[in-house]
Image: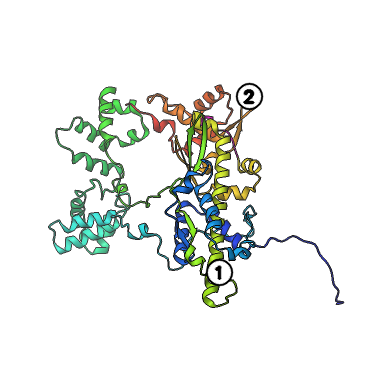
Amino acid sequence: MKQSLQLKLGTQLTMTPQLQQAIRLLQLSTLDLQQEIQSALDSNPLLEADFDDHANETHQDQNTPREQADTRDTSSASEPAADSDWSSEIPDDLPVDTRWDDIYTNTSYSGGEGEDFALEQRNAASESLQDHLLWQLNLTPLSAEDKFIGEALIDAIAPNGFLDTALEDLASGLKAETDEVLAVLKTIQQFEPVGCGARDLRESLLLQLRQLPEHTPWLPQALTVVGQHLDLLGKRDFRQLSRRTRLSEAQLGEVMRLIQTLTPYPGEAFGGEEPQYVVPDVIVSRKQQRWVVELNPETTPKLRINDSYASLIKRADNSSENNYLRDNLQEARWFLKSLQSRHETLLKVASCIVEKQQGFFEQGPEAMKPMVLANIAESIGMHESTISRVTTQKYMLTPRGVFELKYFFSSHVSTDSGEDASSTAIRALIRKLIDGEQPRKPLSDNKITQELDKQGIKVARRTVAKYRESLGIPSSSERKRLV
């Protein structure tokens, strides 16, 4: 093959460490960002928290992030004059608006190797259902053999509180008599929460009813309904149920009130997922007849460069100590600029969202307008991937509650007027219609479709069903109530 020289023109994006840091900070949630800031404070002696920032706060504009003012002040006041050469190498703006899907791996923040940052998750030991039942078993006077059977029974109880394993299988595995296993099970069924150890829903409800005082009103009728007519109750066939029990509609309503006080799945009160704490990144408030967007000043500590250590840096000194201070100074500057860029981008995106969704803040979810990432990206001159990262795990505190920024984005549905309606607004209208329906005659999906059509919103019945299910609302037959 003949060798030759060729010239080719092409574009290539190079990810510098500083750009990678800016992108990583931009996509972190508030809690993860706090851990990242604390890690930087622990590892970089040139970086310190600024606790005396009252003077800076006085001169800040209400729409300017406080962290931006802090980083701007520290870059000019806390650096020695001899460091001007290093400062000239750092651009004012970080190009964080890039296509990340191809050049940056979206991995969750781990807080660094060996860093035990999940303190709450590590120390919060919620009591499980099995632990609670075992504690009561140990307080019950039983023989060693019965306690062994009881431990096996408790271990076989599902998280919802039901015993899913057949008694015969348990007795065979324990090499015990079925009657003996059943006797221990009856003891466990008296533990708290009442109803645990039941083998089905009927037995669970009956156990709870039998624990009530004998003089409880309508208790015998409730035992009859649950014990003999639970299938009719599940179908909400109140007419047939009233005929079978020979109860009037008013009497059956009283029985239903008593049954509704029971817990279908007694084990759900234990375990479950750990609570997820949300800290709002931006705060929206009404001031002087306009909506004002501000960064939450409590989310991140104020940072600055340590003057004492920075003054020790000598220009011509190439010693290891001086190089160490010089490298940490540059890293501290990049970190402050990355934080400033993150806050500016977040504030810009949040302000644009509030501007486009003013109807939501003034009238509620029914006035939500359809909006996609491209609308915000076009308005502020950024790429859609940037908007996606900024709005993920970022929350906004509003007079109507706390919402993730992605909540304000939704698809559109055509209306008779020629305008588009937001799917979020349609969900809100569906919930409003269902909240105002008659319990005895709940609205079917077809009826909801007709009601929306009267308001100029044309949607198919299956679309209404999909939106209703996404809201966690059962079907009309399941929503039927006597009371």
Q: Nearer the viewer, mark 1 or mark 2?
A: 1
What residue is shown at x 51% (from left), y 44% (from top)? 60
The x and y percentages for residue 186 are 19, 50
Q: Nearer the viewer, residue 134 or 26?
A: 26
Quadrant into which the C terminus falls:
top left
Q: Is residue 179 visible?
A: no
Q: Which residues are magenta?
A: 365-371
What residue is shown at x 65% (from left), y 48% (from top)? 383
What residue is shown at x 43% (from left), y 53% (from top)? 52
Horizontal side of 270 relative to 378 (left or right) equals left
Which residue appears farthest toward the front when viewing the image? 81
Quadrant into which the N terminus falls:
bottom right
Horizontal side of 325 relative to 172 (left or right) equals right
Mark toward the start of the polypeptide (1 vs 2): 1
Tag 2 residue: 417
What residue is shown at x 58% (from left), y 27% (from top)? 457
Tag 1 residue: 327
Q: Nearer the viewer, residue 14 or 75?
A: 75
Q: Secondary structure at mark 1?
A: helix
Residue 368 is one of the magenta-drawn residues:
yes
Identity, as a three-letter code, of the amino acid under mark 1: Asp
The x and y percentages for residue 131 are 25, 57
345 over 461 or under it: above or below: below
